[in-house]
Amino acid sequence: MEYDAYIQTCPTRMVLDRLADKWAVLVLGRLDDKPVRFNQLKREIDGISQKVLSQVLKKLERDGLVSRAVFATVPVTVEYAITPLGRTLSATVDALRRWAEDNIETVLAAQQKYDRAAV
């Protein structure tokens, strides 16, 4: 079967939608180096709420991009790691983050120029 993301009913759109989410990009980027505990992820991704982080992790786990490991400690320890499938995305996701960081000043200047012209 051939997939075509330009067709409305193509299931690849679900993956694109997931990866277009800033939180998913940031979570995958943080998991690229090593497994990370939930609370450490929450501390390292400034501004993400516990609820949103939990939702993003569940969606990424469902898509096979992230794995979840539970350790029988007191309290229970839960670690998240990038899967081999998720690793195939890591360079692309990191390039997107780097592009945003490298070009934000140009984007902001373009927005200001556009907004001034619209007035």
Image: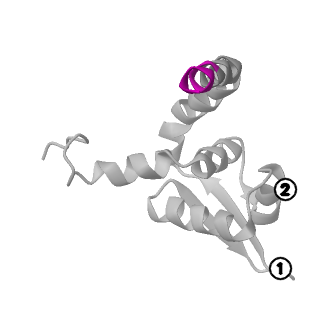
Q: Give, as a three-letter code, the residue at label 2.
A: Arg
Is residue 114 rendered magenta in the image?
Answer: yes
Q: Tell me the residue at 71%/41% (across/down).
A: 33
Residue sitting at x 22%, y 51%: 10
Q: Residue at x 65, y 26 (%)?
A: 98
Residue placed furthest toward the front: 119
Q: Which residue is mark 1?
A: 73
- Asked if residue 97 is among those painted magenta in the image, a careful observer would answer no
Q: For residue 53, what is the image quadrant? A: bottom right
Q: Is residue 64 above or below residue 92?
A: below
Task: Locate residue 24, reporting x and y percent.
Answer: 58, 51
Q: Secondary structure at mark 2?
A: helix
Which span of residues is magenta-colored? 113-119
Label 2, on which residue?
Answer: 43
Q: Residues within 10 Å of mark 1 (few under 14, many from 20)?
A: few
On screen, residue 50 above or below 6 = below
Q: Residues within 10 Å of mark 2 (few under 14, many from 20)?
A: few
Q: Amino acid at mark 1?
A: Thr
In-image side of 118 versus 16 (left or right): right
> What secondary structure prevails in the magenta region?
helix
Q: Which of disc 1 and disc 2 is earlier in sequence?
A: 2
